[in-house]
Image (spheres, rainbow, N blue to C red):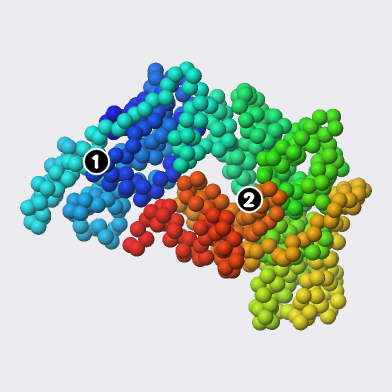
């Protein structure tokens, strides 16, 4: 079938994109390469379509399908979207992606090269032809180009040759592409998706969540939009979740299982009701975690895959818990987060935890018993505060203690509870012993950014302290606000406030932090303290986990990167990505900012931005398959040149 006919079929609804297809992910280099191959009449591959009745064809976009049999693109979406975008000058109705990839393509009549518009390079060269403008004009518009070219005496002699090249470019629309059809009543959605995955084995395979959502959208087309709207609502509240995570909670509510295959036979009504219940329970969960634990934003929201389990428990109890069960459930949530319960084989651990809640013998006690059997003692030991950086698993624990306990600001003396302060933007991480002073004292980076050297203060207080040493400003704080130092678990032995005794200060504060954490956990257990007394002691790692964000400045730089990629219609990375053993959940490293599935999911390799990191952490990330960037500029150049494919030299 001619390319022009295929584009007409897309316009009139005879060809569309199936609901389960992902969005457009090609970059400018791929678009440029496609047109170069077509111009040279090199083969670019055929199309694979699913021929099915339009009345039962679930497709992407808001275009109306033609009556009768329609063709849904299984293989060839990226090529046809690129062709449509350049030829028509706009994306097709089913488009979902980065339109800049096919906007402003140019063709040079002399060199026969394709490039995207670059003002400095092209503004004074009339031989750069707008491909979209030519395609829209067609053969009838060749005269205008001939007139334009003939006006330049230097080009008159070659007008005939140039017209031939323009005609060859227009001839792309007449190229025949082979179309292979998948048809027949036996071609169910399952069969077709399996065919799709086989065809795309080297590209964008559908995940189990994609398939589950495709099946849902087949009967309820608005499902994806409804779910995305809820995700945006949580994003506005500073919690960043994705479709897979939300769908997992819908699944646990409806089926009591983690695996998506159990959703496949559920009706639209069941899915709609399950989504409503799941969203209500997630809202309740976030309110509980924020209000009771003080974990009120995404950066401290560890163990997010514990939420589908909590949602199931809430649903079993009609969303209503007494204070004792609520706190015991939150105790489990915190423990699961501290020990990395869901940093490994997420789906299998969720299934195990769901099973502990099912049947007559299912209970929170069984859930906690299972966690203790998996990890060992649930009691926090001082050595477990040996981590460093804002990415350490116990960083959220320090924030929890600040919000949940009686911690007070050192400048105002006011409590730092979440009920009196907003998001973390109103608090700053404060180095108790200033970084500059510690580096002058020949302390290593891990010591400088050790968790026991962190506390949270208001911005004004942090600025007021500046880079003074504790032996200087601690007495001022204690005089102005007696007890404020102790409220933040500062050892009151004044000898420990001297920089020469810094290691002893850290060790003393670890003990105070561990004692406070165990007290807060006892508070959640309402007298059932035996949960903190049994089990084999869980020893801390022999050395702190490598990597992680070490300052507010680093965090701001990484957040700025995320804003930049989002402006370019690309997905944000994960801050403080927990690189863990998939089986044990043991933390291997903390990567500052990571895209574990690639910036173009499944089409580009895993990427990490590692600011001010050592060769050792870079080696660990490389060994795990990550492409690492050690500066913001290098990362942006990579995105511009290999993902967006912009000419960054102009």
**Picture quarter containing residue 268?**
top right
Q: Is residue 406 visible?
A: no
**Picture quarter containing residue 77?**
top left
Label 1–label 2 contact, CB within 8 A: no
Element under disc 2: loop
* Mark found first going from the N terminus, 1 or 2: 1
646 over 26 or under it: above or below: below
- Picture mark count: 2
Name which residue lies at 51% across and 23% down: 188
Name which residue lies at 55% across and 59% down: 622
On screen, residue 480 versus residue 128, left or right, reads: right
| Mark 1, residue position | 41
Question: Quick one: 190 or 228, which is closer to the camera?
Answer: 190
Residue 249 at x, y percent in the picture = 67, 37
Residue 130 at x, y percent in the picture = 25, 48
Crowding near the residue tagged with mark 2, few <14, some 14–19, many ≥20 C-alpha atoms within 10 Å? some
| Mark 2, residue position | 238
Question: Quick one: 202 or 159, which is closer to the camera?
Answer: 202
């Amino acid at each position: 079938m001619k390319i022009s006919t295929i584009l007409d079929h897309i316009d009139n609804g005879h060809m569309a994109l199936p609901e389960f297809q992902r969005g457009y992910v090609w970059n400018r280099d791929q678009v440029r390469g496609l047109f170069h191959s077509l111009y040279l009449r090199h083969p670019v591959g055929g199309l694979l379509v699913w021929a099915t009745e339009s009345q039962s064809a679930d497709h992407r976009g808001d275009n109306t399908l033609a009556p009768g049999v329609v063709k849904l693109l299984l293989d060839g979406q990226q090529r046809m979207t690129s062709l449509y975008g350049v030829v028509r000058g706009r994306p097709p109705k089913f488009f979902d992606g980065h339109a800049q990839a096919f906007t402003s393509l140019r063709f040079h009549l002399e060199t026969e090269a394709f490039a995207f518009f670059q003002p400095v390079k092209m503004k004074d060269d009339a031989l750069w032809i707008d491909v979209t403008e030519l395609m829209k004009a067609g053969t009838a518009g060749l005269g205008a180009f001939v007139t334009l070219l003939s006006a330049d005496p230097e080009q008159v002699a070659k007008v005939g040759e140039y017209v031939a090249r323009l005609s060859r470019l227009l001839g792309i629309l007449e190229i025949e592409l082979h179309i292979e059809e998948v048809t027949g009543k036996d071609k169910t959605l399952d069969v077709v998706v399996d065919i799709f995955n086989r065809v795309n084995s080297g590209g964008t395979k559908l995940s189990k969540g994609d398939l589950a959502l495709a099946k849902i959208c087949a009967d309820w087309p608005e499902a994806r939009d409804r779910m995305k709207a809820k995700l945006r609502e949580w994003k506005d509240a500073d919690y960043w979740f994705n479709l897979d995570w939300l769908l997992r909670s819908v699944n646990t509510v409806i089926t009591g299982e983690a695996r998506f295959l159990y959703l496949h036979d559920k009706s639209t009504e069941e899915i709609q009701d399950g989504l409503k219940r799941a969203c209500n329970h997630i809202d309740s969960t976030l309110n509980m975690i924020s209000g009771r634990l003080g974990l009120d934003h995404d950066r401290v929201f560890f163990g997010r895959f514990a939420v589908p389990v909590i949602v199931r428990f809430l649903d079993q109890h009609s969303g209503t818990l007494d204070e004792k069960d609520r706190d015991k459930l939150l105790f489990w949530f915190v423990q699961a987060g501290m020990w990395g319960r869901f940093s490994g084989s997420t789906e299998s651990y969720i299934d195990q935890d769901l099973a502990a809640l099912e049947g007559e013998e299912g209970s929170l006690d069984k859930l906690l018993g299972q966690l203790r059997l998996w990890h060992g003692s649930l009691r926090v030991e001082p050595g477990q505060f040996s981590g460093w950086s804002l990415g350490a698993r116990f960083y959220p624990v320090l924030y929890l203690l600040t919000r949940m306990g009686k911690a007070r600001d050192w400048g105002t003396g006011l409590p730092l509870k979440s009920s009196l302060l907003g998001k973390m933007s109103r608090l700053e991480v404060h180095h108790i012993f200033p970084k500059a002073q510690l580096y002058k004292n020949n302390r290593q980076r891990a010591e400088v950014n050790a968790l026991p050297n962190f506390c949270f203060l208001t911005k004004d207080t942090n600025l007021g302290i500046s880079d003074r040493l504790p032996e200087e400003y601690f007495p001022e704080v204690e005089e102005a606000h007696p007890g404020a130092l102790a409220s933040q678990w500062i050892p009151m032995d004044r000898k420990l406030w001297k920089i020469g005794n810094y290691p002893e200060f850290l060790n003393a504060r670890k003990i105070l932090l561990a004692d406070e954490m165990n007290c807060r956990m006892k508070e959640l257990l309402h007298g059932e303290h035996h949960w903190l007394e049994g089990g084999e002691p869980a020893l801390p790692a022999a050395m702190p986990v490598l990597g992680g964000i070490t300052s507010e400045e680093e965090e701001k730089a990484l957040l700025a990167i995320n804003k930049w990629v989002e402006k370019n219609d690309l997905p944000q990375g994960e801050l403080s990505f927990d690189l863990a053993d998939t089986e044990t959940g043991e933390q291997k490293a903390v990567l500052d900012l990571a895209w574990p599935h690639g910036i173009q999911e499944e089409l580009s390799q895993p990427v990490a931005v590692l600011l001010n990191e050592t060769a050792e952490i870079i080696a660990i990330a490389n060994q795990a398959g990550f492409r690492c960037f050690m500066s913001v500029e290098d990362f942006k150049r990579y995105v511009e040149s290999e993902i967006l494919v912009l000419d960054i030299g102009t």
